[in-house]
Amino acid sequence: MSGKDRIEIFPSRMAQTIMKARLKGAQTGRNLLKKKSDALTLRFRQILKKIIETKMLMGEVMREAAFSLAEAKFTAGDFSTTVIQNVNKAQVKIRAKKDNVAGVTLPIFEHYHEGTDSYELTGLARGGEQLAKLKRNYAKAVELLVELASLQTSFVTLDEAIKITNRRVNAIEHELDEREREEFYRLKKIQEKKKILKEKTERELEKRKVAGEVTEPANLLAEEKDEDLLFE
Amino acid sequence: MAGRGKLIAVIGDEDTVTGFLLGGIGELNKNRHPNFLVVEKDTTVNEIEDTFRALGAFSAGEAEASPDHHDPQLLNETPNRQFLNRDDIGIILINQYIAEMVRHALDAHQRSIPAVLEIPSKEHPYDAAKDSILRRARGMFTAEDLR
């Protein structure tokens, strides 16, 4: 873009100014989207970190729960069949709720209790204490897992939202690049034309200068000839 | 959808299922179909996959798109036993070693609900490297780092 003539043809500069304004507008839009993408990505990373932490914690909680189960089995015998066959209504259920982050709605879970313990009256003669401990441990595990599930659903939703936002950013950038290139190309063409025109004008001026000196004697000769002809 | 209670389903070995049932999540719906599956030594991969896959798809259309749908063995499975087809399940807990058996079905599950959580079992401690959800993030991060 260097070497612009000081003598600029108006339309070209005007067009360029307009183009620049439009580019700026698109750039602002693009920047806003980028900000949104950054905000979402930041939240995404935070959630991912929390997920990893919680999963590690979950590993420990599950280990403890499994251990208490083994303990209970040791005392009360194998009660698995009894438990499985006495399923009725769930005591712990979850509700889906909405949370909002950077303009994106995220689904989260909330657990709640309903009804009474199906296994309260289960005929397990021995190991009542271990069983109670076991139930508590698994209830605790369930709460933690519901929290983890919320993190996961947020995570997956954010993942999609970020992908969409980035796609839009890329689309705008692509368009901006194209417009810039077009504008650059157009200006270059105009400049080339002006250059050619200028060179042509200069050459003609040169020619006329040279021709001017030469044409005088030539004219005299031509005139003489003409005169001769006329008089003939 | 908010306010309507959903269930927590579990696909696991006997101990895992027993534990969570004692934790209070088990339920039989009106058709006497359970929200859990006990995986034993002789449980087939198809059965697990079918139960899981059906658990996660809301629309019958998705279930139909699955390549195994026309497997005659699977057609014998009652659709209502399939967790993914049920819209009353919000979370599916699955032992990670079982998740490994049906990894492709898990990876294909792109929806956020029901949430699929991989949990350890007595013999198989939790391995973050295998987790479908975390692997998805890792894919995301490779692109992030390049930016």
Image: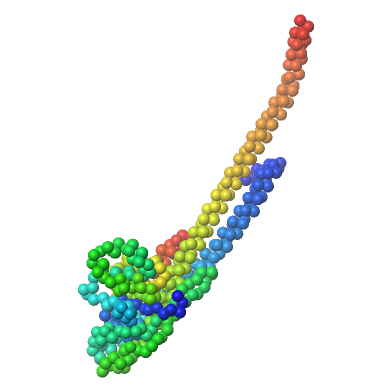
Residue B121, visible in the rendered structure? no
Q: At 66% from the left edge and 31% from the top edge, which residue is drawn?
A: A200
Residue A144 position by quadrant: bottom left
Q: At 51% from the left edge and 59% from the top edge, which residue is drawn?
A: A168
Where residue B17 appears, as percent x and y from the top left, is 30, 80
Q: Is residue A221 above or below residue A191?
A: above
Quadrant in which the N terminus of chain B is drawn: bottom left
The one nearer the camera, A186 or B18, is B18
Residue A78 position by quadrant: bottom left
Q: Is residue B51 above or below residue A179?
A: below
Where residue B88 appears, as percent x and y from the top left, is 38, 76
Q: At 61% from the left edge and 57% from the top edge, which residue is drawn?
A: A25
The one nearer the camera, B132 or B109, is B109
Q: At 33% from the left edge and 79% from the top edge, which residue is drawn?
A: B29
Where residue B20 appears, as percent x and y from the top left, is 33, 82
**Total tally of numbered discs in the picture:** 0
Where residue B113 appears, as percent x and y from the top left, is 41, 72
Side of B88 relative to A29 (left or right): left
* Colour setup of the view: rainbow
Q: Residue furthest left?
A: B42
Residue A135, visible in the rendered structure? yes
Q: Residue furthest top?
A: A232
The one nearer the camera, A7 or A79, is A79
